Image (cartoon, grey):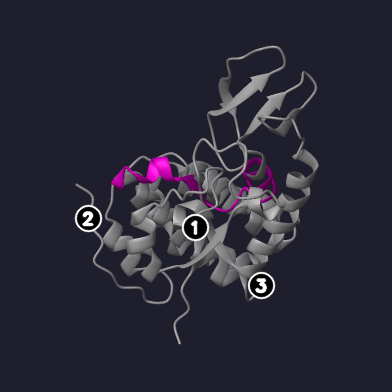
Amino acid sequence: MDVKPRLAVSSCLLGQKVRNNGEAAEFTEITHKWNGHFDLIGVCPEVGVGMGVPRPKTRLLNDGNSIRLVDSINGEDFTGRILEYAQVQADALVASGICGFVFKNDSPSCGLERVNVYRDGHTRATRDGKGMFAKIFTTLYPHIPVVDEERLKDVRQAEHFLARVHFFSLWREVGLSGWTAQTLTDFHNANKQFLLHRSPGAKRRLGRLITSGFDNSEHAETVALTYMTEAQKTLNALTQKGSIANVMEHAPGKITHNLPSVK
């Protein structure tokens, strides 16, 4: 029986009414098209730590020493709870076998970039923050592909993210049997065309990384993890267009679909 790849998604994007105003922010490309090809796992950090629905908005606050997640009305501090939840939940998601994560943009808990940060004594925010949960997740697991739904509105960005997820899922599948110098080298060679197409220079750079790691007697699992971390870092930037349909057709579980091609 074919098993769908798992994809973590901010719960509101799946149509769950968990936002502070009691509404959802459904992203229909995921719920109407991707849902047939992925096992979608909803995650809402704010609900996960016990915040109610509806609830006051939260915000990131820079007090001069650190960034905190606080209630925008009464200043209640949720930082400790979010940090603890993020570590436990991130570990659980990765252990469950997720191959990527789609985050809600602009969220003080889930935003990946340009999130509002307020400073004591200032009424205007600077857009230089990162959601607290997203920051912990990406720090702990930098080798897992992530994206926010704003980028997915661009079909080329959506295709590129799916390609990164597929590449990661292949790596994960091979790694379930344990990494050796040979299996990692074989994986790298089997995906050389993908790397050359997606990020010129990546194949040679990652090949040197493998050689250097084993020349330094690093454990195979360590080299494999470093390999995927560097690969995802390199692949984070979109360089070439492709076809969503082509990516889905080659995804794990022999997925088939009728998603549109990139124009």
Task: Please tell me whether mark 2 sits on a helix, a strand or a loop.
Answer: loop
Q: Position of residue 218 (x, y in %)?
A: 75, 56
With respect to residue 40, does 114 lie above or below?
A: above
User: Can you identify the residue that label 2 sits on?
Assistant: 261
Task: Please tell me whether mark 1 sits on a helix, a strand or a loop.
Answer: loop
Task: Give the amino acid at mark 1.
Answer: Gln
Question: Is 147 within the magenta?
Answer: yes
Nearer-the-camera pick, 207 or 40:
40
Quick one: which residue is furthest to the bottom in this view? 1
* Quarter containing the N terminus: bottom left
User: Can you identify the residue that label 1 sits on?
Assistant: 16
Q: How far is mark 2 from mark 1, CA to CA? A: 28 Å
Mark 1 surroundings: few (<14), some (14-19) or many (≥20) residues within 10 A = some
Q: How far is mark 3 from mark 2, CA to CA? A: 36 Å
Q: Is residue 67 visible?
A: yes
With respect to residue 219, does 235 lie above or below?
A: above
Boundaries of the magenta span: 134-155
Q: Position of residue 170 (x, y in %)?
A: 49, 66
Question: Is 175 within the magenta?
Answer: no
User: Can you identify the residue that label 3 sits on?
Assistant: 178
Label of residue 149 in the image: none
